[in-house]
Amino acid sequence: MSVLDVGAALPRHRMEILPALTPVLVAVVAAPFVGSASTFLTLTAAGIAMGMMIFTMASGLTLVFGMMDVLNFGHGAFIALGAYVATLVLLPLASWSATDSILLNLAVLTLAGVAAGLVCGLMGWLFERLIVKPVYGQHLRQILATIGGSIIAEQLIYAVWGPDQIPVSIPAAFQGSFVIGEAAVEKYRLLATLVGLVVFAGEMLVLNRTKIGLLIRAGVENREMVEALGYRIDRLFVAVFMAGSALAGLGGAMMALYRGQVHATIGAEFLVLCFIVIIIGGLGSVGGSFVASILVALIANYAGFLAPKLALVSNILAMVVVLLWRPRGLYPVSGR
Amino acid sequence: MSAALTLEGVHTHIGRYHILQGVDFDAPGGKTTMLLGRNGAGKTTALRTIMGLWRASKGRIALGSTALNGLAASDVARLGVGYAPETMAIFSDLTVKENLILGARQGPLDDTRLDWIFGFFPALKKFWLSRAGSLSGGQKQMLSIARAIVEPRALLLIDEPTKGLAPAIVGALIECLKEIKATGVTILLVEQNFRVAVEVGDAVRVMDNGRIVHRGDMAALAADERLQNRLLGLSLDSHQ
């Protein structure tokens, strides 16, 4: 016996292209106002690089928010911690950074990134167990507990590393710029873009090609049903939280090098931007965060050049416009 | 013989509401037990409590000799309990295939079992790689049940599978439930459609205000119109 409802062909589900094209649209609109092609290229390359760093920091937050329904205001602490941990590698190995050997330069960057990710991942586990786990499902308490946790983390950073800014240098091979025509594109920005793309590709690969990824995607949509199918969602939560914290740490390390200095407030500074990005992208959507990160960074760069005062509120304005157009973000996740 | 499900004095509180107020019943092994009752009687809460999605504040729940009290839903599922909720709870952003892969927790999908399922639900084969969110309501219900039976289960908890379905699909679903029962699975089925209950049910438990108010054979209830009216405020005739 068979159920008769075989039905006609289903409406085809197409990946919506327009939201993904919004950064391109912004660039096309901004180009005539910027005027000079070389300036436009420099601004765009810088925006994309900044977008990739923001994405690296924010992509973990969107999964944590989407899957665990946790408003983690402590995410910024991992950005700051990652930046500081990177200094523990970059400063002692300054001679590797100073040499002309691209291999040694890459080695020191890789070590710094891995160390930042590992330490932040482990601290993420501790943070989840001690601070987040007791307040699952209680949004107000989550806000209070995670803000409290981030204040403690910031003070611990001051206690360990002191209140002063720590200068860090980009390794020699990645200093300077490639000159394309009259445009200058910084080498480190290209590297940051590459790292961001690798992080994005890795996340998409895990999410779309592995059973763990399948569970994460299902958990973002309906975590209760994932548990009812026999999967220990709490373990998956911890793993996702650790991965999100590790990525925040990696992003923090990248940003520290980009700015050439490390300070404990770097976390709080980028936390707001991370929240804007995951809201614009659609809560729980890694692809949405990727597009939103580039969009936000490009808008900030173009606005900073064309109307510096407007740059102060450009991200908020971008969020308002996107939410008026698509109230659940560029790529909303079903069930959220 | 499949394991029987037993509930003894089960209470469930949700917030300040006392929903289950001492539920006692059993669901015999290898049989289909219908859980009937008016809206708000506590049927869905009973299923969710058995599944571990809500904690029983008091009482005992057991599958065979194994106590389910206090177990997380994942541990209950690992004991061989399949669950198809009223909301279907399919993963809309995943494909039909991916939904079933998640249902097969113990390993890869078994082709023979899949063919058996496709025999009931050919639509799932046709739309194998389609996004589950784009299926029709009936197809989603099929997917929800298919996901619950994609691996052999000891106990199946199914909540209102025929809700909102076209009569032709309901008829086919009845046959499907009968075939699942023939494999020896214990089924606890919440159903508002009395005709479906009569066709597939072996035993019946009727709930009202968070308590069991009737236990018996489904056939006996189907034959007693006065009892139907008293318990459910309906008669079989009115549903024919």
Image (cartoon, coloured by chain):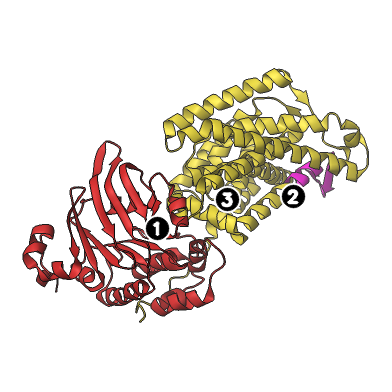
Q: Residue furthest right?
A: A100
Looking at the image, residue A177 sits to the left or right of residue B110; the answer is right
The residue singled out by tag 1 in the image is: B89
2 vs 3, front mark: 3
**Label 2 Cα neighbours within 10 Å, binned few <14 / some 14-19 / many ≥20:** some
The N terminus of chain A lies in quadrant = bottom left
Q: Contact, CB < 8 Å: mark 2 with mark 3?
A: no
Q: Contact, CB < 8 Å: mark 1 with mark 3?
A: no
**Label 1 Cα neighbours within 10 Å, binned few <14 / some 14-19 / many ≥20:** some
Q: Amino acid at mark 2?
A: Leu
Q: CA distance from mark 2 to mark 3?
A: 17 Å
Picture disc at residue A194: 2
Of the two numbered discs 2 and 3 on the same chain, state the one appearing first in sequence. 2
**Label 3 Cα neighbours within 10 Å, binned few <14 / some 14-19 / many ≥20:** many
Q: Quadrant of residue B232?
A: bottom left
- The answer to whether B222 is drawn above or below residue A175 in the figure is below
The part of the chain drawn in magenta is A174-194
Q: Residue at x 17, y 56 (%)?
A: B38
Looking at the image, residue B137 sits to the left or right of residue A19; the answer is left
